[in-house]
Image (spheres, coloured by chain):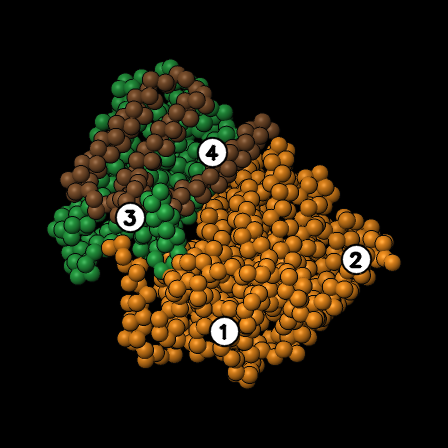
Chain colours: A green, B orange, C brown
């Protein structure tokens, strides 16, 4: 009984003004709110994807190409002949994204994108580790993990660049592609591009913060909250990738 | 770490003192003070509003006198007004830019930007916005966006002409109509900048309201203005990004050969690439997912201002404070699930039509709650008819007369007849245009002393009000009848159709009324700018109001209050509290029963409000009203 | 209950690190599951398969938000104001997908 009354009193205090009801600083709250609205921009793009996808029939099942099998030079041609690629229906992602650097001529569906996913998840982990080190004011550790995160981001972007190049050399562009409906390639470029742009901004932000960490800015300030804020952003980018991965590669 | 917000206002205050010698640039241009930024928003908004209004007068002249040549058209419009005839393509451009300016630049940035900036820190008791720097950026993005939009008036082919809703394919194919070229590109650029500004502002408003309230300012002690601004910011934050996504895709359709919004378009029109596989209806969904919340982004701040002004000038607590908050929240939620009522006639799935119709009709409920609460607040009040109060009552009037037609338009079946006619133009000008403009005017008259430290002339205010009020009804009310008769909107000359010739007189009447309305605004502009320097100096609390901003000194200080920020002990509507001497008790006055603890609620009055003998004036009115009611229902003695 | 205010301070750095790595393994595991399922279900084509993948995505998102973004340790109110608005996105998705299906039927 006594417990509930103190709880109630505390609840009154929580929203009673003079302090943050969430016990977060205004800067962190701003970041959260920004991410919320950014999530809505991604949602609008993904909704577009869903809409256009729904206006096309799905592809038939792939009975010909098994994972790890060899692919001929004219793979795309062959798929078109087999009616697996056609402007009339949405292609199967495994037949489109089946390349891996240095392993030419093998059907390796989804392997590369899984690698990209791991890279991004891993960079998220190093980011939280940096945040955690920040709580202990361990400057060296923060710097180390930030650096790893930046490398992770760059690695991801390089992978994406490779994948785009591959896709483009096979004939995909904003207004046409050999795999199926034109919107397929256009949506791929725009959504992964928008995501990649976020990753790029994240890398730049992380870099600035990294320099500041080395500079001792946050040490003087007494806290590493800035690292937490860019951390939130970075995880958000990771989060978006989860859905990009699901929608473009899995279904 | 998690305490930084506590230090914020204290340290912020010290920082301000550190560099108090300010130069012109940091004080008036790149100011980071919320009060200055509010003024910047207001003045930019007023300028944009004037431009938008002048545009409307030009195309009103065309509608009223389609065969007359106006020599001055050529001198002001150049080749768009050759031989005194308005170019038909330029007509479309004018209504597009007029709509865009009014909706986004005046009533979104000009209204919410001004009053959120001015009032949020002052009314919740904060030194400034959470991030003054972002606040400054927000203004400058808005400013650049305005400039880009205005520049689009001068490009080859003229400004965007696809309507303020920029539906593809007109907006997606640069060759579609003259305005689809460079003008449309600039429109999109301006819109992206505008969205950035709105988001920067919105993030700030929300954070400030949630995080930086002074001690004792519980959520349920916030003035309704703040509630309205908070929810408005939330609406903007959730809906503008969707338009951002939608516009991004539009840019790609225009310039990079994609076809998200295009289907079966022949290649010659579309830059040599065959466009297929998209859908223009998709754009409409994305646009109206912003577009409908947008009308509440426009309206809610005006309603919030009205709540405050009506309560203060009725000397009565606002009726149904909690019901007001709940209806704001309900409107905000519902506004996200009704966007399709703009699309009943565009080939949308009829099933969705019924979903959207349901939501739309439900919105009538919270809207009616708000209306009746205003009326109930006025009821038996000790009404002080200041210009601000008149405009607030005007808002209620427009909200009712325009809102009722919304119920017609919300019915999918009726919309078959009414869609894209002047009925729609009449509806949204009353409920969104006039109502929100009146709310904005009310706010300007009410908080002018807070902004400039001087008072506006009351008599000029009355002239302004009556002329504007009468002309607004004369302009927009007749449009209903034209709409019912099927006169379509966005047409250059209705006289091209014999059956609409009967409306030529009405069109002339409307135009004359519109010119009258334009003249009325000159009175306002004079009053506004003249009073900045020459107005009577304002006392600290000219309207004897309860909210915190009136406890701050008239001179503007960085940090708003010279000493400590006042604590808040009560809700903002303690007007004419029974058993108290003064008829208003500001929020920062403690009650004895509280023992100086702002968290405790003050004691309720021993006597309820109604048993108080109403002031003389109101009593008389009551008698008159009841007599009228009795006669109305036919049982007069 | 008394920990709501500053949960983060009650855990030792080692605990936090352990939790981070656990989350990493969970996320990796889920990704592997994704891929395994993809090949296992190759010959199926239906909504339930898509729903399954989306659900797996949501689970991953949950772990990222809860642990990496620290939402689990924040006030419930913060989680509320951030997560509730996604209801609106769900409505958008629902209605626009219906429209997409309708457009498909019309063509
Ligand atoms: C100054 C008084 C005003 C007059 C005389 C006026 C007149 C008009 C007229 C006649 C049209 C329709 C033209 C046509 O369809 O051919 C129009 C369109 C429009 N007006 Fe106004 N208006 C005024 C103020 C406002 C205000 C305050 C708003 C703010 C909401 C506004 C928003 C719009 C919008 C959104 C359109 C539609 C543009 C389009 O079709 O794309 N107007 N105005
Ligand atoms: Cu609407």
Callout 3 and callout 2 share a chain? no
Considering the numbered disc 3 on the image, is that residue within a helix, a strand or a loop? loop
Is B284 rendered above or below residue C56? Answer: below
Image-quadrant location for residue B385: bottom right
**Mark 3 belongs to chain:** C
Residue at (21, 47) in percent of width and height: C9
The disc at residue A125 is none
Residue B547 visible at all: yes
Q: Chain of mark 4?
A: A
Tell me the SS state at disc 2: helix
Q: Nearer the viewer, mark 1 or mark 4?
A: 1
Mark pair 1, 4: CA separation: 50 Å
> Residue B559 placed where, x, y %?
37, 71
Please tell me if label 4 and label 2 are on a single chain. no
In the foreground, A128 or B612 = B612
Image quadrant in which you'd find residue C46: top left
The residue indicated by pointer 1 is B450
Q: Closer to the camera: disc 3 or disc 4? A: 3
Give the residue displayed 39% in from the left and 73% down from the top. Answer: B561
Task: Please report contact status of discs 1 and 3: CB closer than 8 Å, yes or no.
Answer: no
- Within 10 Å of disc 3 (Cα), the crowding (few <14, some 14-19, many 20+) is few
- Which chain does tag 1 point to? B
Between tags 4 and 2, which lies in front? 2
Residue holding disc 2: B629
| Residue position for label 4 | A50
């Amino acid at each position: 009984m006594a417990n509930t009354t103190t709880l109630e009193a505390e609840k009154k205090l929580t929203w009673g003004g003079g302090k943050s009801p969430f016990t977060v600083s205004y800067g962190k709250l701003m970041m959260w709110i920004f991410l919320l609205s950014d999530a809505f921009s991604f949602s609008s793009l993904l909704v577009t994807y869903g809409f256009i996808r729904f206006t096309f029939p799905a592809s038939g099942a792939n009975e010909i190409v098994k994972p790890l099998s060899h692919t001929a030079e004219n793979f795309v041609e062959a798929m078109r002949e087999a009616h697996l690629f056609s402007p009339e229906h949405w292609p199967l992602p495994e037949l489109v994204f089946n390349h891996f650097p240095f392993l030419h001529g093998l059907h390796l569906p989804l392997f590369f994108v899984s690698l990209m996913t791991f890279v991004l998840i891993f960079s998220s982990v190093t980011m939280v580790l940096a945040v955690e080190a920040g709580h202990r004011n361990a400057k060296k550790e923060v710097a180390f993990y930030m650096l790893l995160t930046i490398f992770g981001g760059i690695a991801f972007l390089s992978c994406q660049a490779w994948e785009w190049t591959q896709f483009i050399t096979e004939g995909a562009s904003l207004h046409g592609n050999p795999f199926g409906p034109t919107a397929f390639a256009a949506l791929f470029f725009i959504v992964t591009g928008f995501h990649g742009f976020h990753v790029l901004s994240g890398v730049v932000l992380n870099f600035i913060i990294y320099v500041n960490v080395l500079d001792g800015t946050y040490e003087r300030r007494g806290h590493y909250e800035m690292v937490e804020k860019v951390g939130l952003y970075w995880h958000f980018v990771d989060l978006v990738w989860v859905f990009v991965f699901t929608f473009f590669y899995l279904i | 770490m998690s305490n930084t917000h506590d230090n914020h206002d204290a340290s912020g205050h010290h920082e301000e003192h550190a560099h108090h010698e300010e130069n012109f640039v940091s004080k008036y241009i790149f100011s980071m003070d919320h009060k200055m930024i509010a003024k910047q928003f207001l003045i930019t908004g007023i300028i944009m509003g004037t431009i938008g209004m002048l545009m409307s007068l030009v195309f009103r002249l065309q509608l009223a006198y389609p065969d007359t040549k106006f020599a001055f058209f050529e001198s002001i419009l150049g080749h768009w007004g050759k031989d005194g005839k308005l170019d038909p393509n330029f007509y479309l451009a004018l209504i597009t830019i007029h709509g865009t300016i009014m909706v986004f630049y005046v009533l979104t940035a000009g209204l919410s930007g001004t009053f959120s900036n001015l009032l949020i820190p002052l009314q919740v008791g904060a030194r400034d916005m959470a991030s003054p720097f972002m606040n400054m950026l927000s203004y400058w993005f808005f400013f650049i966006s305005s400039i880009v939009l205005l520049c689009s008036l001068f490009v080859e082919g003229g400004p965007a002409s696809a309507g303020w809703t920029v539906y593809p394919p007109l907006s997606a194919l640069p060759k579609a109509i003259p305005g689809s070229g460079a003008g449309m590109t600039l429109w999109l650029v301006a819109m992206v900048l505008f969205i950035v500004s709105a988001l920067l502002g919105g993030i700030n408003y929300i954070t400030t309201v949630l995080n930086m309230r002074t001690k004792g300012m519980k959520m349920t002690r916030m003035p309704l203005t703040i509630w309205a601004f908070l929810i408005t910011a939330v609406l903007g934050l959730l809906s503008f990004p969707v338009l951002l996504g939608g516009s991004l895709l539009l840019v790609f359709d225009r310039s990079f050969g994609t076809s998200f919004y295009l289907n079966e378009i022949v290649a010659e029109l579309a830059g040599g690439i065959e466009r297929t596989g998209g859908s223009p209806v998709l754009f409409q969904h994305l646009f109206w997912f912003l577009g409908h919340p947008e009308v509440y982004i426009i309206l809610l701040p005006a309603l919030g201002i009205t709540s405050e002004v009506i309560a203060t000038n009725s000397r009565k607590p606002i009726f149904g404070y909690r019901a007001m908050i709940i209806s704001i929240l309900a409107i905000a939620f519902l506004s996200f699930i009704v966007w399709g009522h703009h699309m009943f006639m565009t080939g949308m799935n009829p099933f969705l039509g019924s979903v959207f119709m349901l939501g739309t009709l439900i919105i009538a409920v919270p809207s009616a709650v708000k209306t009746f609460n205003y009326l109930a607040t006025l009821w038996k009040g000790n009404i002080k008819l200041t210009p601000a109060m008149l405009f607030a009552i005007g808002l209620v009037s427009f909200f009712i007369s325009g809102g009722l037609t919304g119920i017609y338009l919300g019915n999918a079946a009726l919309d078959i007849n009414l869609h894209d006619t002047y009925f729609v133009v009449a509806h949204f000008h009353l409920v969104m245009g006039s109502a929100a403009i009146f709310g904005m005017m009310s706010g300007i008259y009410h908080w002018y002393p807070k902004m400039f430290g001087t008072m506006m002339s009351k008599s000029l205010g009355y002239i302004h009000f009556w002329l504007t009020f009468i002309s607004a009804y004369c302009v927009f009310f007749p449009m209903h009848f034209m709409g019912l008769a099927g006169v379509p909107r966005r047409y250059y000359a209705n006289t091209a159709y014999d059956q609409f010739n009967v409306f030529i007189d009405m069109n002339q009447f409307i135009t004359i009324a519109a010119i009258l309305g334009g003249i009325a605004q000159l009175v306002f502009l004079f009053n506004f700018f003249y009073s900045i320097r020459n107005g009577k100096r304002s006392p600290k609390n000219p309207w004897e109001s309860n909210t915190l901003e009136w406890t701050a000194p008239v001179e503007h200080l960085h940090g708003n209050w010279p000493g400590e920020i006042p604590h808040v002990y009560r809700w903002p509507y303690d007007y004419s509290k029974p058993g108290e001497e003064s008829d208003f008790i500001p929020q920062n006055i403690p009650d004895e029963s509280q023992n100086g603890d702002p968290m405790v609620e003050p004691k309720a009055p021993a006597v309820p409000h109604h048993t108080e003998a109403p002031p003389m004036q109101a009593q008389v009115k009551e008698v008159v009203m009841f007599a009228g009611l009795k006669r109305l229902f036919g049982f007069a003695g | 209950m008394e920990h709501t205010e500053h949960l983060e301070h009650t855990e030792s750095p080692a605990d936090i690190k352990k939790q981070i790595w656990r989350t990493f393994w969970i996320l990796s595991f889920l990704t592997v599951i994704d891929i395994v399922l993809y090949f296992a279900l190759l010959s199926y084509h239906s909504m339930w398969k898509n729903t399954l993948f989306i659900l797996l995505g949501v689970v991953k998102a949950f772990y990222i938000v809860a642990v990496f973004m620290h939402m689990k340790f924040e006030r419930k109110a913060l989680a509320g104001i951030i997560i509730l608005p996604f209801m609106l996105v769900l409505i958008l998705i629902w209605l626009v997908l219906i429209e997409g299906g309708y457009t498909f039927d019309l063509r």
